[in-house]
Structure formats: structure tokens, C-alpha cells
Image (tube, rainbow, N blue to C red):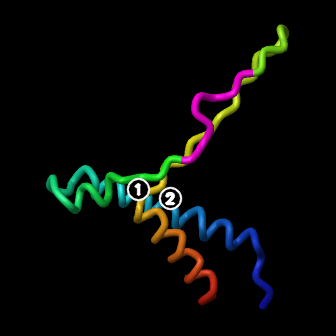
Amino acid sequence: MRKSPWVLMVFILVGGLLGGILGEVLRVMAPHGTIQNIFSTALTPGINPPVTVDLVLVKITMGFTIRMNLLTFLGIFLGIYLYKQI
């Protein structure tokens, strides 16, 4: 059976989203201390502040930020693992 790269992208996206949501829930619910520090530490690559192009007629603002914590990475790796198992 031939595997599609689009299916891999879906697995990675869903794994990352579920991991990110679980990480944010655990960050809020965990008691203060080491556990909360682990889940509150996040990598946030992106364009900050957003880039604005003013063409007089149209003003375009472009930017993005990705917030990734430990469980986001684990979710991505789990998605890749599950994709390979199918």
C-alpha cells in the first residue's frame, strides 16, 4: 500500500495539536514547581511584530507565531510513529 505525504501531514498536525492542548491543560492544572516549569516552557518561533505592507489602496499585514511545548513535540513524534505503523 502506497502512503500519501498528505496523510503524514495530517498525522503530524493532529499529533501536534493534541500534544499542545494536553500540554496547556497540564500547565494550568499542575501544581507550582518543576512539573509546571516543564510544561510552561515553550518554543515560540515566528514573525513578531507582524510585517505590514501599505500599498495605499490595500494594507496587508502578515505574521505567524507557533507555540510548541514538550508535549507538542511528543505528539508530533507519536503521529509519525502511528503513520509508519499503518
Asked which quadrant contains residue 13, the reply is: bottom right
Residue 3 position within the rendered picture, expressed as x and y whole percent measured from the top left: 76, 82
User: Residue drawn at (50%, 58%), measured in percent from left and top?
Assistant: 17
Vertical position of residue 61 compared to residue 47: above or below: above
Vertical placement of 67 versus 63: above or below? below
- Residue bounds of the magenta highlight: 45-52
Picture residue at 25% right of the left edge, 50% below the top: 28
The x and y percentages for residue 55 are 84, 14
The image's mark for residue 82 is: none
Determine the secondary structure under disc 1: helix
Q: Which residue matches tag 1?
A: 21
Relative side of 1 to 79, left or right: right
**Quadrant of image for the C terminus:** bottom right
| x and y, in percent, of residue 72 in the image | 46, 62
Q: Circle 2: is it few (<14), some (14-19), or many (20+) Cα within 10 Å?
A: some
Q: Is residue 53 above or below residue 40?
A: above
Left or right of 29? Residue 64 is right
Q: Determine if the magenta segment contains residue 17.
A: no
Which quadrant holds the N terminus?
A: bottom right
- Quarter of image, res 31: bottom left
Residue contact at pointers 1 and 2, CB within 8 angstroms: yes
> Secondary structure beneath disc 2?
helix
**Percent x, y of residue 38:** 30, 60
Q: Amino acid at mark 1?
A: Ile
Foreground of the two, 24 or 63: 63
Count of numbered circles on the image: 2
Question: Which quadrant would residue 2 be assigned to in this image?
Answer: bottom right
- Decide: few, some or many residues near mark 1? Use Cα within 10 Å; few <14, some 14-19, many ≥20: some
Residue sticking out furthest to the top = 56
- Residue 17: assigned label: 2
